[in-house]
Amino acid sequence: MAPSSQPVIGLHYVGLNLKKGVSAATFETFLRTRGTQIPAYPGWQWALLKGLRGERQDQYLMLYQAPSAADYGRYITPAGELTAEAQRFWQHHPEGLALIEEWKTFATFGELPTLFSTYSLLAENRHSSLPAGPFYQDSPAHPPIARVVGIHHLALRSGVTAADFDAFMVNNVQRIDDYPGWKFHMLKGNGGNRAEQYAVMLVIESLDSLNAFHPGMDVATQKSLDFVKNHQESERMYDEWREFASFSGAPQMYTDYLTLAGNAG
């Protein structure tokens, strides 16, 4: 299990209020003009993602990232309920609550009763070239950021225990070389609808960077093939990985998302 100081990721499905005549365009206009002013808990980030391709193309997902399990638990219970501290936070941010209520006129918000899962960070590529920064940024004072997030669900092979796979991943993640501007994370479910299940989270600096290597579902460019040829230790690690569990990408369930909005603070 990942140390308690590692980030916790929460994922909530979000759906449009189609029966009220809401379109994707009207919701996304709200997100960019007003939604980014919704605050995050101290130290947290939130980002609203839209499926580019995969099983949830054109559908929305709310991503919450807390800096640690302790920080997550301060505000959200294991069942997904708000803690007393979270309720006090919103009492001190009535303007944020008003924006959330406005959001709900367009779509569901990232909260119960939507399907959700929380994940601990089991392992990550610590020598990635992905620049530090938020998932989304749109400010005259800073360059724009709209990262791509890939969520790829995994399954263990028959006879493989979670402890086997955890140990392999923690002990071998340093062998992974990501594409430039990409960062690999292995997540393990610790609550919600996918507890004790695994997902790869790929964070990519931009849509251009995604398309430079994989412009379509299960499509690899020459740039991608050349990178693989020159990083064979990663490929050997991936072959060993496949002895424990499925690999990211087809035929597993996966979606690549573009970040549309996030907290401005």
Image (tube, helix red, strand yellow):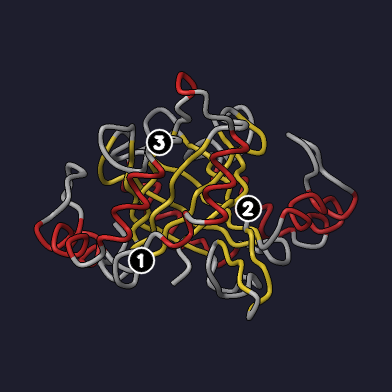
User: CB under 8 Å between callouts 2 and 1?
Assistant: no
Query: Element at badge 1?
Result: loop
- Does residue 239 appear left or right of residue 37 in this picture? right
**Residue at 56%, 40% in the rendered image:** 242
Mark with earlier residue (3, 1)? 1
Q: Residue 210, percent across and down?
A: 74, 52
Query: Element at badge 3?
Result: loop
The quarter of the displayed image where residue 132 is located: bottom right
Q: Amino acid at mark 3?
A: Thr
Q: Amino acid at mark 2?
A: Val
Q: Residue furthest toward the bottom?
A: 141
Which residue is denoted by mark 1 in the rendering?
Answer: 44
Q: Nearer the viewer, mark 3 or mark 2?
A: 3
- Does residue 64 appear left or right of residue 72 in this picture? right
**Figure check: 250 above or below 265:** above
The quarter of the displayed image where residue 51 is located: top right
* Mark 3 Cα-neighbour bin, 10 Å: few <14, some 14–19, many ≥20: some
Which residue is denoted by mark 3 in the rendering?
Answer: 105
Q: Amino acid at mark 1?
A: Trp
**Figure check: 144 above or below 203:** below
Q: Residue furthest toward the right?
A: 222
Q: Nearer the viewer, mark 3 or mark 1?
A: 3
Q: CA distance from mark 3 to mark 2?
A: 26 Å
Q: Residue furthest toward the left?
A: 84
Mark with earlier residue (2, 1)? 1
**Residue at 70%, 59% in the rendered image:** 206
Give whichever of 132, 243 is nearer the camera.
Answer: 132
Query: Element at badge 2?
Result: strand
* Mark 2 Cα-neighbour bin, 10 Å: few <14, some 14–19, many ≥20: many
Question: What quarter of the picture does the N terminus occupy?
Answer: bottom left
Q: Residue 6, percent across and down?
A: 34, 67
Which residue is denoted by mark 2 in the rendering?
Answer: 148
